[in-house]
Image (cartoon, grey):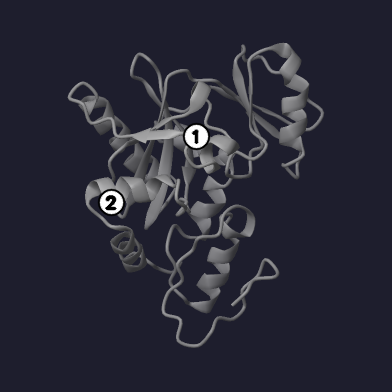
Amino acid sequence: LVLDEDRIDRLPEGVEAVFLALHGGYGENGGVQADLDKLGVPYTGPGAAASRITIDKIATKRVLEAAGVPTAPYEVLPRGTDATSLPLPVVVKPPRDRSSVGISKVTEPGQWAAALKAAREIDPLGEVLVEAYIPGREWTVGVIGQEALPVVEIQAPNGWYGFQEKYTKGVTTYVFPDSVADAPLVAKCQMLALLAFKAVGCRGVSRIDFRVTPEGEPYVLEINTIPGFTATSLLPKAAAKRGLSFSALCVRLLETAACG
């Protein structure tokens, strides 16, 4: 079945479950999930309601705040508002997209206008999410079912994990912070990942991204409901550390497939 529009109203005969690997838009915003619910076909990953929340960074932050999960200080700039009260450096994001598209780090005033323009070109409402930049380490925690996988630390050049750093093989280094000194912080991030997973109503699988300050304070950046499965993707790395081969990981995810 080839999708040439954002809709699924039929599937080939004999399909027992769908392994979702669609990124952004219809694939992650609850659209494909809702269509599969109507067909009564189980699928991997969170359901439509959780997907609608997590594709929206503003909605996600508000749910996490209510659940007591720390996130970076932020402001939402509606269309026509071009100033922030947050001190530089900040990160400027389109609120409703994935894969670091349209995201900029602003360290000096001369970068501000271009960052706003890049974000607003992506968001259909013209809104912009501005977050305080959290210095420190970049960590991510995969969750399968009710289990938090080993933490992966992302060591990107110049401390910025943007689109090129994510998708260009060999540019970014990935390690496991498994020293004795890091153990309490690893446990804390795994606990927060499970809390965030539950707060937004996820099931099956997701990946929760963090920034960790030099003082050891973690902040959740976002929740990815369809983690990548490429050569540079993080969930398969964490699963391998846990002892799950790529094929075993795929089987495990299919075992969590559900409707509704």
Q: Which residue is mark 2?
A: 146
Secondary structure, mark 1, is: loop
The tag earlier along the polypeptide, 1 or 2, is 2
Q: Residues within 10 Å of mark 2 (few under 14, many from 20)?
A: few
* Residue 62, image x, y percentages: 52, 35
* Residue 80, image x, y percentages: 82, 28
Q: What is the three-letter code of the residue carrying label 2?
A: Gln
Q: Which residue is mark 1?
A: 171
Q: Which is in the foreground here, disc 1 or disc 2?
A: 1
Mark 1 vs mark 2, CA separation in Å: 32 Å
**Is residue 131 placed above or below 43 in the rendered structure?**
above
Residue drawn 41% across and 50% down? Answer: 206
Q: Nearer the viewer, residue 212 or 156?
A: 156
Q: Quadrant of residue 23?
A: bottom right
**Is residue 109 placed above or below 33 in the rendered structure?**
above
The total number of labels drawn is: 2
* Residue 190, image x, y percentages: 29, 37
Task: Left or right? Give the position of 200 relative to 141.
Answer: right
Residue drawn 22% across and 52% down? Answer: 243
Task: Left or right? Give the position of 110 relative to 164.
Answer: right
Using the rendered image of the protein, determine whether residue 82 is visible from the camera's viewpoint.
Answer: no
